[in-house]
Amino acid sequence: MFAFALVSSSTIMADTKIDIGVIKVDSDFNPQGTEFRVSTLSTERILHLKDQVFAWPMPEPKLFKLKKPLSSIHHSEISYDAKEEDIYAFLDRFDNWSNDEIQPLMDTEVISEHFEQTAAEMVQVLAQFSSLKRKRDGDDNGDESKTKKVQPLYLGSSSFFESLSVPSQTRGHHSASVFAGTFMGRPADRFGLPNALFHPHLATLHYKLGKLDEPIEDPNQLFNVDDKLLTASHEFFVSSLAIYDSEKDRSTAMGDFFKQAFDGQGHERRPYYSNNGKLIGAPDTIWGMECKRLKRIIPHVMIKWKNEHGSGDSGLQIDEPFFKSKRLPMILICIDGPTLSIYSALHLEQVTVNNLLTLDLAQYVDHDVVVLKIAHIHSVLKECALLLKTENEQIVNLVGPVNLPRQCFPDPTSSPPYNPTALPKLTYRGGLNHENSLSMKHNFSSIRCLYIAKPLPDWCANPASPKDVVVKFSTRYNETAHQLLAEAKLAPKLYLCQRVIGNRYMVVMERLEGLPMSFYATEACIAKLEPSVFEGLERALEILKTKSIVHGDLRAANIIIDPEKKHAKVVDFN
């Protein structure tokens, strides 16, 4: 079933009517396509919009601002029998960019400008629904029994999106990306940035677990292992391969290994409640500190046990509201029979969970190798858990109200041995959107990897600190190509390109003024550009060609035109 809910607000300024389109997709839908229907109703949850806004979900979310309202009938009160209308013809005009009824808005933050600050998070959700298949001319409707009549949604005083369901995306995905899909965050293994870039202790966890299979001259520099730990690791390995009658029996047999790592008994399965008494989660085991002021345990480690494969995915059964209520970084350990998985969890714009390690102990033949690896894992977990615990103690022991932090901006750590210079000291101002402008500071899309930052006086980079810089995090980057064009003033100045923990390059470059060439798409707009723009682009290609370099993604979006429309600079050297 497809459901398209169209919302009009009766609480905005006198003669203004606002439409917000939200598309829900049921996971069990007719693959041949069904007709879309519109239900109109009103809500008091969205206030003071400047114009009509229509949200259409795509694989990469795109939003559109309507220059003309849809022809639906609006009701000034919540209606249970709202008129339905077929907007099929409107959707068929979607691909016609010359149509004057729609204007593309390329980023969530642009839409957010139409909202009061209290409604900003609603806009984030508008842009993060899954893509859906549109019916086109000639398609067979298939089984009409699967086409259900849309019932209007009731949008009362409760949270605006509690009524909206998101389709399950768990089948065929790794639990790391399932977390992101389920929680409308970023898929950790495909888009966005890893948690290691946002928290130094999670960076330590990420880096050291990533070194388990690499040859190291002196392992003692990374891992603290003694005879007692090797004995415990051997016992853990043997107990992980045994067969148990229940999850409780497995946790009892294997639990001592973690008790030794995290100093103490830990807190066995107990329900956790929000301030209004709502159950928010019950992990099997947690380690944390008791905060008397908050009257609860502040966890830094959580464990979920499964006795065998096929009894459910432990990584998916840790409640997202539990993470969300804590906001503090955590280590999540999942045991599925003989398989050990370790995740980092952090509350950014959404809850994000990164899979750092999955180890099937039943696959190892060399006993000594696996026991040593388990000991190294134990050492890393113990070190990082202590760092998180110490940090949490400092936070909850502060005098005054406890305001739990949200890591909205990166805090990267140099990746040894790729650290010849210190990372520049920056104050992040916000995200950089597709219009080459600043996004809202606390409401930028979680899949963005570009930021605008202000260098601090001692920012540790040459030359002297500029007013603003662009910071990019990329899995790969051609520093040579960027530097060649920067020297010819055909690319922004490059201040830094350095590996950081999280398998990313941190790239710091000059902030350019102007718009991407994609905003000059029509012939009339192109005619306004000076010939020097195109001459510069030809020269850029020639410079790269002399070094046998191909840009690979030289499209209009990666060419910035200066405000005077006389010069162009190339960006995006991934």
Image: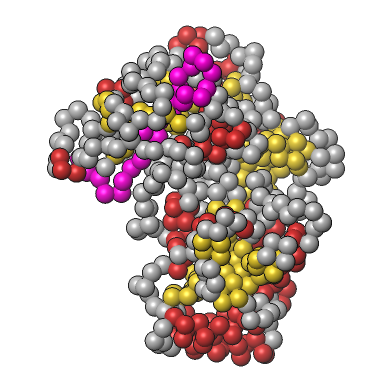
Looking at the figure, which quarter contains the C terminus?
Answer: top right
Which residue is drawn at the image coordinates 85% and 43% (left, top)? 458
In the rendered image, residue 265, in percent from the top left (x then y), is placed at 63, 81
**Which residue is depicted at the point 75% across and 53% down?**
401
Looking at the image, can residue 128 be seen?
Answer: no
Q: Residue at x 28, y 37 (%)?
A: 150
Residue farthest along the right direction in this orientation = 457
Residue 65 image position (x, y, % from top left): 46, 22
Task: Please give left or right for residue 381 compared with residue 180 in the image.
Answer: right
Residue stretch rendered in magenta on the structure: 4-32
The magenta stretch spans residue 26: yes
Residue 419, can we see it? Answer: yes
Q: Where in the figure is residue 294, as x and y percent of width and height?
A: 69, 61
The residue lying toward the viewer, choosing from 312 and 371, is 312
Q: Residue drawn 64% across and 39% down?
A: 442
Image coords of residue 437 (percent x, y):
62, 27
